[in-house]
Amino acid sequence: MALVNQAQLKCPALTARHYSVTRSDPRKGNYTDMTTPLYDSWNATLYAGNSAHHRAQDAAYLSSFTLAPTDHILDLGSGTGEFTNKLAVLVPQGLVLGVDASRSQIEYARRSKANNVEFSLGHLEALDALLEHRKFDAAISRATLHWVNEDDHPLLLRTVAAHLRPGGFMRAEFGGYGQMASVITILDDVATSLGGQTIRCFFPEAEQYRALLQQAGFDVMRGFVRLVNQTRSIPTFEALVGLLRSQPYVGYEPNLPEQNRQAFRELAEKRARTELKRADGSYDLDFVRLDLLAFSV
């Protein structure tokens, strides 16, 4: 099957609403975020119930860097908050700020947040206005940055660099070139046949993203930028359907005519049942992650 040139793709504009959210800063008390369009296409409960393949990577990821107990951490794309709370355990006298553009995810995360965690609703593309004067010792991101339009990455990276203290670092992993290629081939085909679009996520090559980090002022010589191949366990067809409905469908369904969305699911899952089944009966998926560590200067 032909592989799309995924490094050139961008995320679609998801269905948006406007929200005004009050958050808390110990130095300022409560204040209101700028009002901005926010994605509402995510179902937090569905996502939390189908993110075991991400959570299986948490321990290894957390062991790849060191935090001081008093550090302040920025979690870019905090989702339903499970990983954010694990970060909070590592900084018991510090603080973790999780930022996400999904109101559903933020509300879900707030229901079980650790005492030293804050969650703020907002676009990563408008991160500077959200953070204002705040500084952090580390910026961490899991499975998020491929959802940010390619053209917005230079500004996002400059903003992250500006809000890191000297010697701070950025540690991130997200979809890289070749991410879930067999899945995307099926979903692109079905979506376009029903009047939709191909998924427009940004899945870069390592050298492409290394250049963006350097242009934003990061030191990558002491860190790394690499593609990591993974096979993630998806043991049953039901588990595959849960993953599809909770995650990649978000990149397709908002751009489909509403009357065709159910047909999209039915046709995509019919093809996935046969085309993605492995010889051992599982539906394990091949992931490619852009994995990076870069330092503030």
Image (cartoon, helix red, strand yellow):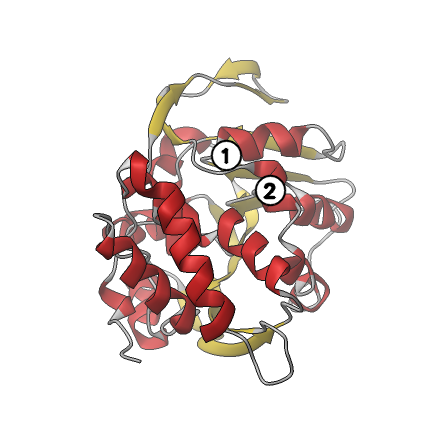
Q: Is residue 49 left or right of residue 251?
A: right
Whole-percent x, y for residue 172 in the image: 50, 60
Q: Is residue 117 left or right of residue 150?
A: right
**Which residue does the image show at 64% across and 41% down from the upper left?**
81
The foreground one among 62 and 18 is 18
Whole-percent x, y for residue 252 in the image: 34, 48
The foreground one among 153 and 2 is 2
Circles 1 and 2 in contact, beta carbons < 8 Å:
no
Measure the alpha-carbon separation of dots 1 and 2.
Answer: 32 Å
Location of residue 163 (image quadrant)? top left
Location of residue 238 (image quadrant)? bottom right
Task: Identify the residue position indicated by label 1 in the image.
Answer: 134
Q: Which disc number belongs to residue 46?
A: 2
The foreground one among 241 and 110 is 241
Which comes before the other along the chain, label 1 or label 2?
2
- For mark 1, give the secondary structure: loop
Give the amino acid at mark 2.
Leu
**Which residue does the image show at 66% across and 65% down from the upper left?**
57
**Which residue does the image show at 50% across and 49% down from the upper left?**
245
Give the amino acid at mark 1.
Arg
**Quarter of the image where the C terminus is located:** bottom left
Residue 4 to residue 157: above or below: below
- Do we see residue 161 in this rendering? no
Q: Which disc number belongs to residue 49?
A: none
